[in-house]
Amino acid sequence: MSLFWSLPRRWLAGAAAGLLALSLAACGDESGSGSGSGEEKVTLGFVNADTIDFHTCLEKAMELEAAAAGAEIIVANSTRDPAKELANVEDMIVRNVDAIILQTVNIDSLEGSVEKANAAGIPIFLTSVLGPDPSKILGAILADVEQSGRFSGEWLSEDADGEPVKAAIIAGAPGAASDLFVKGFKEALSDNVEVVFEQPGMFQRAKAQEVAENLLQSHPEVEYVFVPNEEMAFGALTAFETANRSDIKILTHGGSPAGLEALQEGKFVTTVSSTPKDIGHMAVEATLALLEDPESVEKIQQIPTQLVTADNIEDARPYCDD
């Protein structure tokens, strides 16, 4: 069994010390009822990728789950910077956490982060996106973003009803989740749908608004826009409303309260719900379980993914802890 699958070093040292303490207590108390000492608290390091609502809710869910389980969690944020992500992972290693939970910035930094954790012998657990080699990680909780893209593409194809239509994509940051969103979306489109525009909005509202303005200049005939997160979708919405183009149908991903309200008001036509609340709670729960017993739970798990429209909005899963 490789090093990153073993229990953290200080757990092993603590276990040995605990056995010694029990032996001494037994010698000093014939009844065998020595006081002993409490178990050392597990410390998790969470390296977050950004500060938008999704990541804020993800962090909150992890903190609540860790507190409920009696574990400590140390949080760092990479603010969309791959170099900062690697530095944050290195800092968690220096702090000698029992495991690192990583919401990565992109695939390139993900691979470097996993390698650093492996070299240090600290288990690493991934959220949202799976790395290229699952044997190198403790586990993962995934949002099936490719399926999310497929849901959006299928809805668009059904809505177009065989008529030739033009669509655009305002993607996120290249790499990791954005590429999978777009891949699923494109694969699900019927032949009558033509994608005439695709630019990254970098998962940022202001950037997505700028891209949407470029879209209106270059392809004013567009009828549908796929925007794989609600933060960007609101930026695109601002551009469309400013240009009096409320006819453009926005398909997005998130399921936040603001997103559901926009859906109800007809500003978005679909969103796909895979909530950070689910990811955060499940990630901490699975990490702690796998540290204790690698066979106790599934190594790779997925959270529920749900297409939400105005017709089923009341069934959307809770996005964030209250």
Image (tube, rainbow, N blue to C red):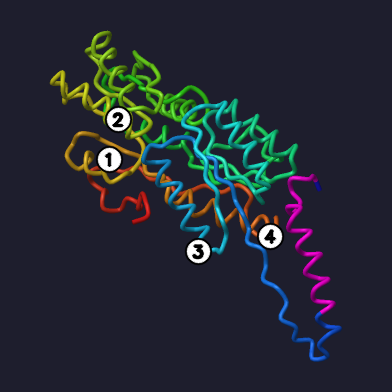
Mark 1 neighbour class, 10 Å CA radius: few under 14, some 14 to 19, many 20 or more: many
Which residue is under mark 1?
A: 259
**Helix, strand or loop at mark 2:** helix
Which residue is under mark 2?
A: 233
What amino acid is labelled 4 in the image? Glu
Q: Could you give the CA–CA distance between mark 3 and mark 2, rounded to whole angstroms?
A: 34 Å
Magenta stretch: dominant SS? helix
Labelled pair 4, 3 in contact (Cβ < 8 Å): no
Which residue is under mark 3?
A: 68
* Residue drawn at point x = 62 percent, y = 53 percent: 298
Nearer the observer: mark 2 or 4; the answer is 4
Labelled pair 1, 4 in contact (Cβ < 8 Å): no
* Residue drawn at point x = 49 percent, y = 29 percent: 180
Q: Earlier in the sequence, mark 1 or mark 4?
A: 1
**Helix, strand or loop at mark 1:** helix
Q: Which of marks 4 and 3 is nearer the N terminus?
A: 3
What amino acid is labelled 2 in the image? Ala
Instruction: Please say if 230 is above or below 301.
Output: above
